[in-house]
Image (spheres, rainbow, N blue to C red):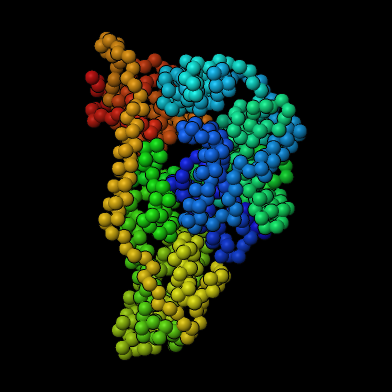
Amino acid sequence: MSKRTLVTSALPYANGPIHLGHLAGAYLPADLYVRYKRLRGEDIVHICGSDEHGVPITIAAEKEGVSPQDIVDKFHEQNKQIFDDFGIDFDYYGRTSSEVHHKTSQEFFTKLYEDGVFVQKTEEQLYDPKAQMFLPDRYVKGTCPNCGYEEAYGDQCESCGTSLSPTELKNPKSAITGDTPETKETTHWYLPLGDFQERLEKWLETRENWKPNVMGQVKSWLNDGLADRAVTRDLTWGVPVPLEDADGKVLYVWFDAPIGYISATKEWAAQQGEPEKWKTYWQDEETDLIHFIGKDNIVFHCIMFPATLMAHGDYVLPKNVPANEFLNLEGNKLSTSRGWAVWLDEYLEDFDADLMRYVLGTNLPETKDSDFSWEDFQNKVNSELADVLGNFIYRTTSFTENYFDGKVPELDNPTDKDLDTLKEITKQKEKISKAYENFKLREAITQTMNLARIGNKYFTEMEPWQTRKNDRTTCGNTLHVCLQITAALSVLFDPILPNKMAELRKELNIDDGSSWDAISDSILESNSSINKGAILFEKIEDEQIEEQLNKLKERAADNEDSAKENYEPLKENMEFEDFMKMDLRAGEIIAASAIEKADKLLKITVDLGFEERIIVSGIANDFDPDEIVGQKVSVVANLAPKKLMGVESNGMILMAEEEDGSLKFVDTDAKPGSVIK
């Protein structure tokens, strides 16, 4: 085991508030793991902070008519507070607009530049003369050269999924002025990732216990070969490139943001009064570096940032990157633009943070997307927290208060059942530890609750309400066992329910500095005093859940009404004869697979009745290949063949795009091959 652990959580963009999906992705999982390690007495530091650079920040600023600094100042403080309110216990929460971060990032760039790592390229990029600026990829819209979609962005076509550069778009328009941009030469520096491919592959071979979804995505990129990646771009907001001939250029946010972990650790060390202590966590090989992220950040943390660290040469590389998949809400994708989200600050107006920590923890999207529903929230709070954990604790402490004067009874001539039940404390503790160590946090929570179930079952079977009348020794033994389980739970549940367990330990008169090693079948001494506390978990009523659902639906409806004016306008009228040229057929998907190095494309085999067709469709962000097999579809069957990412596509599957960009199948129950008229 290494001497210390450094945990990082993905830096959230400081352009909006934190919602439930954020919490499930990188912050609650990291906090559960860190709190467990702290209970073990291990040297562990948890670092996070605001990602305050990049195009999303400038876009948010333009929408509100303020400066980018105004945006990041606002949301940095808001998000920092909400994390604290939810019990996400960072050792330090920094920000990438800080002076220390700018200096650290510039020093990184300068070291790699002076070592000759970068490749310098002069290329033509789109420039808006009226705005007097080069246009970042998301500031350009135009017609996709592959599928003809007229609202493609400069980095990727949202319709077919093809990766693009702004200069590839047909009829490009500036998102700032609406004018047609011109091309102009600009110079940038690139990290030649291909030069690091062999080192990355050898390093990844040494990684153990990585999630298959993480390693699979990484190997897909490596199998396709790594290309040069720009580390600078033309923007006015960001970390200035520290070169004399680089006016108006900043470090690309993918390059500077992960360095934010390092700069934040420097600021933490300075806060501790030991300015050089950060080096122990970043440059000592006996440190385990763990990145908690969402799946959209896998490539950056498993390929690009490690390559950057390798190029520098003085830093440890990640031991593990336990990335989570995405959290859906009430069966649909989270969408902030559609109002389909649960904002954490609004949640706290109605419920305790610990309730969501538990429910969300039992449903983390560890290996595949998961779904949060308010009905499930209610069920788990009522049937698990209230009926199992809360009921067991209250029955145990109230019986002790009422019939043993609030004193822990001695264990007198215990039965095998008494002793076997006590042994369950150590057995469950070992199972829970193993789950945490392997980043199986859902399992850790399940096994923790299982100990409460064991205690509840034992209490019921021993019937202390009967034995208190005619067998005080047996009743005392029952309560002794249950109190020891209660004490163990007060520590075992601490990573999950920190506020409630602090209350419970106070009731049990347990030192709040309790450790994992102290968890045993004899935490409480016989004859020590306890206090019967209030009921820890109140049940949630149907009306409360109905209120949350109405709030969600009303906000989504309000956003839908306000978004109606943003619907894509109708295209020019066409003649009936032109429409009749299209051959629309009913089909059924019989096979589907991902296309390497094409994040949004799927290779789909469609049964058209009279033949099978291969069609390439840009729906990978909306559907998993396995889940669409058997889906009925409508197909443009006479579209000219076209190669996309090396695969010939023979047709187009019709999709409907909602205002938030999500896709739905235009399906039909007609027999495959039927003509759609």
Residue 287: x and y, percent?
66, 54
Q: Is residue 374 above or below residue 662?
A: below
Residue 635: x and y, percent?
32, 23
Q: Residue furthest right?
A: 114
Q: Quadrant of residue 450?
A: bottom left
- Which quadrant, please, contains the C terminus? top left
x 54%, y 74%: residue: 511
In the image shown, does 644 or 82 lie closer to the viewer? 82
Along the horizontal axis of the image, is 268 left or right of 401? right
Along the horizontal axis of the image, is 468 left or right of 215? left
x 32%, y 57%: residue: 378
- Mark yes or no: residue 204 visible: no
Residue 62: x and y, percent?
49, 31
Q: Residue furthest front?
A: 66
The total number of labels drawn is: 0
Q: Is residue 382 above or below residue 394?
A: above
In the image shown, does 579 or 345 lie closer to the viewer? 345
Q: Is residue 136 above or below residue 474?
A: above
Q: Is residue 515 above or below residue 481?
A: above
Residue 216: x and y, percent?
52, 40
- Mark yes or no: residue 563 visible: yes
Along the horizontal axis of the image, is 260 left or right of 522? right
Q: Quadrant of residue 517?
A: bottom right
x 70%, y 57%: residue: 273
- Which quadrant, please, contains the N terminus? bottom right
x 39%, y 41%: residue: 334
